[in-house]
Image (cartoon, helix red, strand yellow):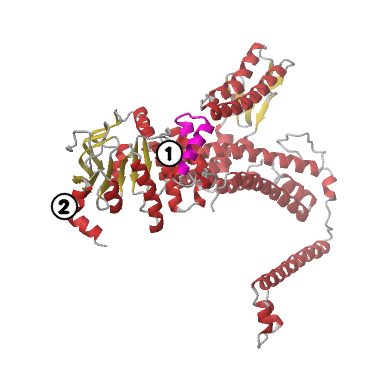
Amino acid sequence: MNDSTNNVSATGRALGESTIQIRNMHKWYGEFHVLRDINLDVKSGERIVVCGPSGSGKSTMIRCINRLEEHQQGDIIVDNVELTNDLKNIEAVRREVGMVFQHFNLFPHLTVLENCTLAPIWVRKQPKAEAEAIAMKYLERVKIPDQALKYPGQLSGGQQQRVAIARSLCMSPKVMLFDEPTSALDPEMIKEVLDVMIELAEEGMTMICVTHEMGFAKTVADRVIFMDEGQIIEENEPDQFFNNPQSERTQLFLSQILAH
Amino acid sequence: MSTPALAHSPSQPSLISRLWYDKENRSIIVQILAAMALLWLFGSMVLNAIHNLEALGKGFSFNFLKQPASYDINQTLIEYSSRSTHFRAMLVGIINTLLVAVAGIFLATILGFILGVLRLSKNWLVNKLAYCYIEFVRNVPLLLHILLIHGVVVHSLPRPKQAINVGDAAFFTNRGVFMPSPEFLPLFKFVAAAFIIGVVFTWGFRRYAKALQERTGKQLPVFWVSLIAIIGLPVVVFLATGQPVNWDIPVLSGFNYKGGMVVRPEFLALWLALSLYTAAFIAEIVRAGILAVNHGQTEASMALGLPRNRTLNLVVIPQALRVIVPPLSSQYLNLTKNSSLAIAIGYMDVTATIGGISLNQTGREMECMLIVMAIYLSFSLLISAGMNYYNNRIALVER
């Protein structure tokens, strides 16, 4: 359990109701215990950064939130819907939870605009013109409206990731999950993607980001979560987390990651 | 091209070296030399053939095509008798080849896609059964399959007198499967009209549904409405007009059935063998195609809230088709060319007629083989052209 029972973020911003609740969640891959007793409560408007060494279960944890991975024990409740084997519930949760992947995963056979309108048309049942207008609005926000009629293969990595963010936003999600969104990008492109994410955070989007961008964590996060070997080791506001880490494991990780 | 700067340089290279070391000139020179060598090779082969044929006392002529063929063909879809010409025999053969190739491509595609999907099933038993089938079938030569199925059809099915009777309508015998043939009464034109109306309606309905979705976002049950319009409507009209079809039911007379229509055992064996064999290869192509679509695509689509069937239709299949289509067309070509194995069981295709009996009777091996090669070549080029057209339509845009 975390201690934020009042609706104020660790950094002092006003927050809404609890959007994601994870209680005593465990996950195994066969014999391998990937996630151990995860407890996490995310309030509407909260920005959370998850970090930790590779193989620590960060990605697996956020992939459990939209059921790209199944958990075997414990409860996950997203937007008042509990994730079980019920496909209707899973689809309902996925409609409200946007996800941005490390490798963008844009649909290569569709134009940028079609990538953005596919789900609104088929899931939200929006008229095409309306879906396109909304898509153009979000493409403008990620600063690539002029690429709308190109195919993903014709764009740079940074542009593709911004399209992927716009594609998720077109579903007007309540929560955005970012799974290492900048790890596959060249340094100069990382900034353009982070800028979009920072802007999104400033507009009050509820976000969970798995990332190694510690600068981003410092400027944006309300809370930083450190994971290792499938467990949440430490959870604190960024100031405390970076300047006064509690556990030895966290200190070691930070010394390694901040050394260069 | 040599630049002016080079021309003014003190040590002027010779003309030959300038031609040879220029990228563009060199490629032209090489192509001219290769073309000359090829022409010389072909020319000498053709001249050699003509000399040898003349030495044997045979000219090169296609006049034999106008002579009577004087042999019977067991499966003729157009009018043919032993008094017809060799040309007519060739046409019968072409049609028989086309029939078995088209029917084979049709069945092989359906079976192949089903097997390919079963091969990806998470159900252990289904997966392994599909695996065993595919591995057995594609690792045994096609000729053996043809002989095996022909043997099964001819030897395991009874003689006409003891035919396996299915509802007094279809009769399975070792001389083929005898089935009723339809004879359409005047009222049947309403059924045909209903079918055409159904197809036109479906076409219009699909357009309307697409436009409606674009305008309002509403989704109509296109599949079910199409099904009812194309199949349901003609069936209703058929029943309402009092089933305006007379069935010519085959009747046993003497040693064989008369009337109706017959699917001959040679056709059955060749068709099944070609389809089952090619289906195993198509199954592997389909499996590879679906696996080639990155799992991230499925995840991205599902993360957007698209249900599984929409994810398949809108994201996975359009991308898998790009991987499937090119090798699929070469399987279609293989099936068509493999149909020439028909000769092993006496199915009278183009190889058995003009390339077999006509050749032996007239002694025109050069001409007959050229004709057969030209026919298969045109089939293959037609299939290639069609598949290339389809492939270009779905090709991926990159850069």
Q: Which residue range is magenta in the image?
A: A120-140
Quadrant where the N terminus of chain B sits is bottom right
Q: Amino acid at mark 2?
A: Asn
- What residue appears at the point 20 percent right and 59 percent down from the top-left corner? A255
Residue A125 among magenta residues: yes
Determine contact: label 2, label 1, CB under 8 Å. Answer: no
Which percent across, then down, holds residue B131?
43, 43
Which of the chains bears the disc numbered 2? Answer: A
Q: Which residue is mark 2?
A: A244
The disc placed on residue A107 is: none
Report the predominant secondary structure element of the magenta stretch.
helix
- From the viewer's perspective, is residue B82 above or below residue B187? below
Nearest to the eye among marks 2 and 1: give it: 2
Identify the residue position indicated by label 1 in the image. Answer: B301
* Residue B350 falls left or right of residue A195: right
* Depth check, front residue: B193 or B46: B193
Amino acid type indicated by mark 1: Ser
